[in-house]
Image (tube, helix red, strand yellow):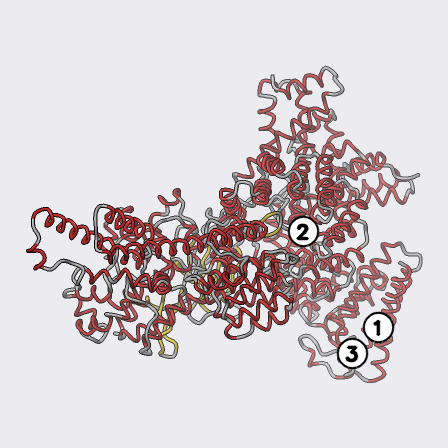
Amino acid sequence: MSEVTQVLHAIEQGDPQAASRLLPLVYEELRRLAAQKLSNEKPGQTLDATGLVHEAYLRLVGPGEESHWNSRGHFFASAAEAMRRILINRARDKMRHKRSGAWKRIDLDQLNVAGETADEELIALDDSLERLAQENPACAELVKLRFFAGLTQHESAAVLGLAKRTADRTWAYARAWLYEALSQDDVPATNVP
Amino acid sequence: MSATGGDVLEIFGEAAECASPVEAVAYLDVACRGDVALRERVDALLHAHRLAGKFLQGPPAHGDRVSTESPGTVIGPYKLVELIGEGGFGVVYMAEQQQPVRRLVALKVVKPGMDTRQVIARFEAERQALAMMHHPNIAHVLDAGETVTGRPYFVMELVRGIPITEYCDQHRLTPNERLKLFASVCQAVQHAHQKGIIHRDLKPSNLLVTLHDGTPVVKVIDFGIAKAIDQRLTDKTLITGFAQVIGTPLYMSPEQAELSGLDIDTRSDIYSLGVLLYELLTGTTPFDKTRLREASFDEMRRIIREEEPPRPSARISTLGNAAATVSEQRRTDPKRLGQLIRGELDWVVMKCLEKDRTRRYESASALARDIEHYLADEPVEAYPPSTGYKVRKFVYKHRRAALTSGMFLGLLLGGGTVTAWQWLRLAGTERDQAIQQVHRSQEIHSALNQVTELRGQGKWAEVQAMARRAEALMETGPVEPELARHVNDLRSQLDQEQKDRQMLAVVEDIRLRQAEVKGERFDTRNAENRYTTAFRTYGLELESHESAVRQLRGSAIREELLVALDNWIWCKEKTDPARAKLRALTNEADDNDWRRALREAGGQGDVSRIVELTKEPRALQQPPTALALVGELLYQSGRPQEAADWLRQAQQRHTGDFWLNHHLGYVLFAVMVPPRTDEAIGYFRSAVALRSDSAGVHYNLGNALREQGDLVAAVTCYRNAINLNPGYVPALVNIGAAQKMKGDIAAAEATFRQALELNPEHAFARGNLGSILMMQGDKEGAAACFRQAIALDPTFAGAHNALGALLESQGDLDGAADCFRQALEHEPNHAQAHFNLGVIGRRKGNPDGAAAHFRRSIECNPDYADGHHQLARTLQSQHDYGAAQASYRRVLELRPNNATIHYDFGILLAKMGDNPGAVACYRKAVALDPKYAEAHCNLGNALIHLGDFGTALESLRTGHELGSQRQSWRYPSADWIEECERWLELEGRLPAILKSKIQPADAAERIEWADLCRYKRMYADSVRFFTEAFVGEAKLLTETQVGHRYRAAGSAALAGCGQGDGATRLDDDERAALRRQALHWLQADLAGRTRRLQGGTPKELQSVREELRYWQGDAALAGVRDPAALAKLPVEEQAAWQQLWADVADVLAKIQVSK
């Protein structure tokens, strides 16, 4: 039984310490997988979050555990948070790199992947997501699962233990909320007046 | 009751699920029960909900895009016409340029799939180097950019010519005419070498002759591109790259045939030039084409490295029947051609073809000079083969010794032997002994003769072996006393020679090791100590002044020793009393006035006198090591510009000197502000090629390459440095940084920890370990490392900056700002810290402060594109459009091929009412990135304003098609298309509308007609329809936010100022009436806005402000606003308009105050 499986079992048993042990394990595995993926790809390549999370799941938990839906839920909640951190860190690092010249002799940054706009948008999204989390944590959780871990609405609802209708409403609300928040300081794509 | 999140979600959810908008409104009226804030919030969210499209419903980034080129493809402003060449990594097309001039060019682009980061970085570095070359004999690089998929391309002058050899034969050029053309090739190559660029593939097909006004002009093409694309021939690429290596073995230098790519320098090009000259003279290459082609790969390399080709004149005599053709093509006959070449031209060619590159011409210009000497009937620098330049110089210095041993040539034939008479008188044993003695003497003579010959060739080990053999022979029995004396003399001469040579090697080694970095500085301490030992070992007693001066004056290597002493003085601490003493001694032993004056000026720290001395014509005649020393003196005295100028001149004289190349690179990269990295790389590369065993120069090259973005090459350099010096912590740290950049975090962490084991107090390593921890999510650990790094080196601005970035990411904006300020305290010109403060300012809602910081960041680094870009955006958000425009222009200079910036700039111009300008920007953006959906949409919307609905619709459709595929698309592009289709349809009905054949359904449709006419530049008609609409429905006039009246005023002003189609049909009175109407509408509009200000929300104030700013810049109103235009109007009208604009300014000022 893998370490992650052990932790998941411990969570099932109600061990209050277990949940905090899960995130570092999942994070480390995802980060490693992401780095490996990126190093083999051409510049401009993106991370396939869904693929990564599922691959990490198979590696850390194994296919035999599929039926334990609760375990999966805990796992994916951690994975969503880990993916968010990875992507945001990468985006921030890249932005820092773009600001460039921080170290006279040594660079601190990642190079590769995607365009400027994507990074800025991602960071702006994450900033807004943090504010949404303060107002409505469930909304933010749902966004993390769907957007960062690439889970379907159905899977996400199951992870969060939400009924379908509630989940759909929550999703619609979160999307509208974030869209509205991001549009505030947005550059419009239409002309004035 | 205030709106809590739960309420909002609940009500939003219900409303969003309502079957129709009417139902939703009814529901909201009840649910919000007069709570205005709640209702506003839910309305805003519902609006967002409707617009959100596929927002957030896909993965968080763009996808990958791949495409290939073919004839017909458009890359930037170029349209590919046909493929004209293809290599392993790149393809060359003939392409047609449309703007700004129509012409054909050559466009070289990296093949898809070959665009590894490595290749791209090299390509880019090389392009920058190439762009610096401006020479009539080098094909210019005209432009460069990136394809849509990010692959770089060069655009070069399209040279339509034929290979130089073919040209010469076709036109039957005489040898002298050929030499003149050849000299121009040398000058071009020299120009490149001065820029640190090595061609590496000089051959006739890269040297094309075109006719300019009937005069043949050679153009060197493909300069350095071979290098950019295939720099190093490693074992791995040997197989795949075989065809390329094989391609031109005829012109390949022995060191290139070695395939150890590192060791190639400018002198490889000299070799290739030699082959070319050989071919121009004899019609054949030094090695036979067929033989090289048929030889195995290793055999081919062996031939190039080991075989001596026949001299050109000798080759002529073995050409057989072909000799007649070859001579005929040179307008001469075989006999005369052979005579012409024999001697000087033979020597010049063979000097180029020396296997040992130190014996070749030192520079292409030296070769050109010799050609010119020859053409002017002056003696050439080249000597007959077998006595290379350096060897000869050494022999000259040891002339006495050389002559002495040379005497033995005659000894055997002259008096030293027994006569026949004596011979007959000897008997038995005596005769045997005499025979033995003669044999012995003969063998000694032969050994001594070989010593002479080997010395001439500089083969010192063999010289020693042969001298020892002579000595051993003497031990075996008696020889003539004179011969014995010669052998003994030779021994002491050789000993001295060897001591001199050893001393030269030691002195050179000291200078080499000095390039290593101890901490952040050159290791002068070590050099200091080693000089002491070296001079003692050499036997120079510096303590006794007079004998030392005498010894120096008598030394065969005096110049070198003096330069070494100068360097030693340079290394000594300024406070060392021995310094002045040593300087006095050196000065006394030196006869060169210039050096004496320089030493004096150096001693007194008189920098301006030093600069003055460097300006003297004789200054540059000093030996290269002295030139390098002066360069160092200049930049360490705070004169980087002078140092760079000086070193440039020096390097031009001695392109093959290690130190000059290194120092020039160093000054350009590490001393000058801002650094000239691209140039520096060229010089560092030359330095590495010249002496690949200096860890320091590998390190510096690595840093420069890293700065240039070529991480892979940089790491190779750092590894080379560490292989040479395993304890080299800075190189280790930089490898770690590179590993980190590649995402190999574990390896990077190990490397940094290894570096910290070697030196626990290495602040850079500590700081980088911190950044690794930060990436692993250990922010506390990271913060600890940054703080330790700061403790180790409180002036470490980068660590302060990194700590700030960390705090910023934790949301501690104040703490972060403190750190950035700290960074600036230690490095006031830390552009990034200024930039970061700007970002914080903006995040904290202080755009004024942010703008100031962005301004500072670009003051520190004028080429800081991000600084300019963010400044532009900040200014734009503050509605300071004029300044924003200037900033955008600067960003576009720095990043002309960034679609996003063109796009942003387009938005600004559109905001300023400059629709033609906006259209140009959007067009550029979509040309650079054809998949840029937003830009297509904005292009469409801007084109509507220009009345080009057909093109607009196309753009909008493209934009919508691309955008709606994206999950994050959140613009109502479908509505825009519909709107545009409506315009197109209306446009079809325009003739009928104008002839009043049809009537509008209502006032709203009439407004549409008014706008249609406005877009079609029929301003008088536009005014007519607006007026009719307003008459029909007065309500339209009160809706100031919709802006009907403002647009109507714009049309009236334009028509009134004679703009637009059909304006000539209006008489002066009609125009004046239109202007009055415009004024009236604007006055009414302004009054409406002023009313809105009273008790208006901040948002309302903001929008009024933005609108009035727009008035002030609107191109439509220029004719009634700009002073020059106003001056043309009747006086009383002028006053009325001036009053209006004063009122506008007044209202704006009030908004500023109330803010």
* Residue B151 pos. (x, y %): 51, 52
SS at circle 2: helix
The mark total stands at 3
Q: Is residue A113 visible?
A: no
Quadrant occupied by the N terminus of chain B: top right
Q: Quadrant of residue B348?
A: bottom left
User: Mark 1 vs mark 3: same chain?
Assistant: yes
Circle 3 chain: B
Q: Which residue is mark 3?
A: B1123
Alpha carbon separation for disc pair 2 and 1: 41 Å
Q: Is A141 left, or right, of B295 in this rendering?
A: right
Which label belongs to residue A47? none
Q: Is B1019 left, or right, of B245 in this rendering?
A: right
Q: Nearer the viewer, residue B907 or B268?
A: B268
* Residue B701 pos. (x, y %): 53, 52
- Tag in front: 2 or 3: 2
Which label belongs to residue A99? 2
Quadrant occupied by the C terminus of chain B: bottom right
Alpha carbon separation for disc pair 2 and 3: 42 Å
Which label belongs to residue B1141? 1
Q: Quadrant of residue B235?
A: top left
Q: Nearer the viewer, residue B121 or B383?
A: B383
User: Mark 2 vs mark 3: same chain?
Assistant: no
Q: Which amino acid type is shown beneath numbered disc 2?
A: Arg
Is residue B769 placed above or below A99 in the rendered structure? Answer: above
